Image (cartoon, coloured by chain):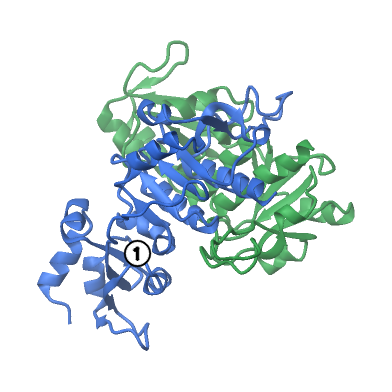
Chain colours: A green, B blue
Amino acid sequence: MISQAQIKLIKSLHLKKNREQMNLFIAEGKKIVDELLNSDNIEVVHIYASGNYFEDTPFTKVTEEEIKKISALTTPPNLLAVCKIPAENTVIPDLQKELVLVLDDIRDPGNMGSIIRIADWFGIGYIFCTGESVDAYNPKVVQASMGSIARVKIDNKNLRTVLQESKDKRIPVYGAKLDGTNMLKQKLTANGLLIIGNESNGISPELGKYVTNAIKIPSFSKDAIDPGSAPDGAESLNAAMATAILCAEFRREALK
Amino acid sequence: MISQAQIKLIKSLHLKKNREQMNLFIAEGKKIVDELLNSDNIEVVHIYASGNYFEDTPFTKVTEEEIKKISALTTPPNLLAVCKIPAENTVIPDLQKELVLVLDDIRDPGNMGSIIRIADWFGIGYIFCTGESVDAYNPKVVQASMGSIARVKIDNKNLRTVLQESKDKRIPVYGAKLDGTNMLKQKLTANGLLIIGNESNGISPELGKYVTNAIKIPSFSKDAIDPGSAPDGAESLNAAMATAILCAEFRREALK
């Protein structure tokens, strides 16, 4: 049985201020909740389901009507988990060894979720976000990450530390820019920071000043004589697409 | 002035059956409409706008209330164009020279739109779709393509011809598959077909039988000894992300 108070509490988690106050977020669907149950990083507090999805994991049986009330999705998948937002990291990764992502004001939940999924695919363990970025525990982000939020650490606190350390230790800071150097024409390191800018405005001046290597994805307009110069086609790529291509290129280079 | 009959007609274009019957679709926002106005491929029939967006192009001035009525978007950008769906291609591209995309039942409008934008960025001029794929003139696809639909030709008719021709002429047909050969470990040609499968089910058996080269994007799970094998992280990439990474890799190889 789910009580009215529980329904009210879970619905309140659709909003960031309540998630932050209670340190809880929701995730929906068997696949994503399974991944969270297997996560070292995230604790599943309670599961509500309208069917018998689990043999070993305790859950509260609810009706489809009740799931609809607590779900943040248009088509609720009949299984919802309340999870703990992990404690902020106190350690930061070894920037001499690891490649990490920095999201500078990524606003679209779908983009943020996709970027988390990409990081997971390419074995990038940390994403540092500016305060203006969409909350990573927003239900839409959690769903778009397809469970990858169970493995990738999202850090909203230590961005300044990481930027300062990169500067002090001369760690490369790559910034995705439309006027950067063609990614195929520069040597990419296996470690460092890769900054992805806002969907409309790109990288902010504040973060831009830390960039040591501006990098761009060459376009291959049909009519361009020199690929990568003077594109005649799409003006830009979506932030998540650009992240996907750049991460693939970094990993490719690191293999050499 | 916009008449009630016009409002009714434009609203009807939110649905595929009406778009097909009237051979018209809608596009919204200054940027996208500008690109369509510059397109050789697509004819803008009429523009409705609530502000003075154009100096040289005639348009019908409407109120914001009226725009809300005809818009397919939650936040209408105050400018909407009715455009002609281009005639089906009678010529198909030279498969000995060109790389083309084949979408096997891509259902999500956001994915379809993003894939069109990626094709445009990488100078891929043709996308062939199965009948089950989402309609490329769906308003959500048009918006997600960010105007790239003005340049990339979408073909719903000649897929069989292209597949048969590839078979007859021994043109490589790449299929994105999770159990394919690592893209970094095979030679990619500058021409051929690249098939992207459905978001949940991948490539259908029907199209799968044409695949000559199964290809996958290696994952780089942190704990994997051999990158690309036995991923421990994300199970898969979103269809549009995978397309982005693969197109970048094909173009990179073609540059060699």
Q: Position of residue B239 (x, y in %)?
A: 47, 40
User: Quadrant of the image for the N terminus of chain B?
Assistant: bottom left
Residue carrying label 1: B75
Q: Position of residue A102 (x, y in %)?
A: 68, 51
Q: Residue at x 54, y 53 (%)?
A: A134
Q: Residue B82 is drawn in which quadrant?
A: bottom left
Relative image position of residue A54 (x, y in whole percent): 42, 15
Task: Name, please, the residue furthest toward the right.
Answer: A169
Is residue A16 in view from this perspective? no
Residues packed near mark 1 inside 10 Å, few (<14), some (14 to 19) or many (20 plus): few
Question: On the picture, is A172 further left or further right than A132?
Answer: right
Horizontal arrangement in the rendering, residue A249 relative to residue B112 (left or right): right
Residue at point 66% right, 64% down? A226
Identify which residue is drawn at 67% across, 35% down.
B184
Work out which residue is located at the far left of the displayed protein and give it. B5
Nearest to the observer: residue B160 or residue B109: B160
Say which of B202 and A41 sits in front: B202
**Residue B12: x and y, percent?**
17, 59
Determine if residue B26 is in view: yes
Task: Identify the amino acid type marked 1.
Answer: Thr
| Whether residue B29 is situated above or below residue B118 in the rendered picture | below
Q: Is residue A129 left or right of residue B71?
A: right
